[in-house]
Amino acid sequence: MLATMSLFALNASADIVISGTRVIYPESAQDVTVSMDNRGTKPLLVQTWLDDGRDSTNPQELKLPFIVTPPVSRVEPKKGQTVRITRLGDTLPKDKESLFWFNVLEVPPKAKESDGQSMLQLAFRTRIKLFFRPKGLKGEPGDAAKNLKWTQNAPGALTARNDSPYFVSLSSATVNAGGKNYDIETHYIAPFSNQTMSVKNYTAAKNNKITWNAINDFGGIDKYESVQN
């Protein structure tokens, strides 16, 4: 089924909509559920699975401590489907979050040829983050984004330091130097790590204001400001 992703498009956008932009899996939960809606006009076959960042690997080859049920389902038009994610075993780190990716692949019904014309089809894939969150982590998830430390170690780049056990997902960021804003090429920042991000045409030195937008647990945007060191 995954191989059908190489087909061409019948529609310009996906019909399956996931209720949320991320999944939080607390260690205390036996499982978590994810809801999906088919907002199209045709029934769809939907495949769901997790990956660990290797997005092009066949799901059957990934050995992850989770199971997704049902892995394949038929979703009628204007109807919904709920899938359950259950953790297996106890092999993940206890001192920080772990990141996985939740995948939804939708395959439309086979198109019928009309008046001798060939119809083009595409299987649409949606991919969102899943954070496994152990019990007893220090601090709060929102504080992780708030307390990022920014430094400049080379021209045209800024480095963000995340000293928390939580992942920080940035949606956008800018640095203001000399009254002009420069866009930062944002990435997510793993726990207890640095992430260097490029800034086009920016060669300024220290003590400039940085503004960044971080995505919270609910998919909302929190805005922060700081002065780089």
Image: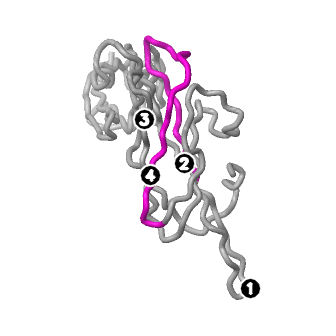
Residue 112 x/y as whole percent: 68, 77
Circles 2 and 4: CB distance less than 8 Å?
yes
Q: Distance between the residues labelled 2 and 4?
A: 9 Å
Q: Looking at the picture, does residue 73 appear above or below residue 216?
A: below
State which quadrant residue 52 falls in: top right
Q: Element under label 1?
A: loop
Q: Residue 116 carries which label?
A: 1
User: As shown in the figure, which amino acid type bears the numbered disc 1?
Assistant: Gly
Q: Element under label 2?
A: strand
How many other residues sit within 10 Å of disc 1, few (<14), some (14-19) or many (≥20)? few
Q: Residue 32 carries which label?
A: 3
Say which of marks 4 and 1 sits in front.
4
46 vs 118, nearest the viewer: 46
Which residue position holds label 2? 104
Say which of marks 2 and 1 sits in front.
2
Who comes first in sequence, dot 2 or dot 4? 4
Question: Is residue 192 highlighted in magenta?
Answer: no
Q: How far apart are marks 2 and 1 (CA)?
A: 33 Å
The region drawn magenta spans: 77-105
Residue 115 x/y as whole percent: 70, 88
Q: In the shown orientation, is residue 8 left or right of residue 218? A: right
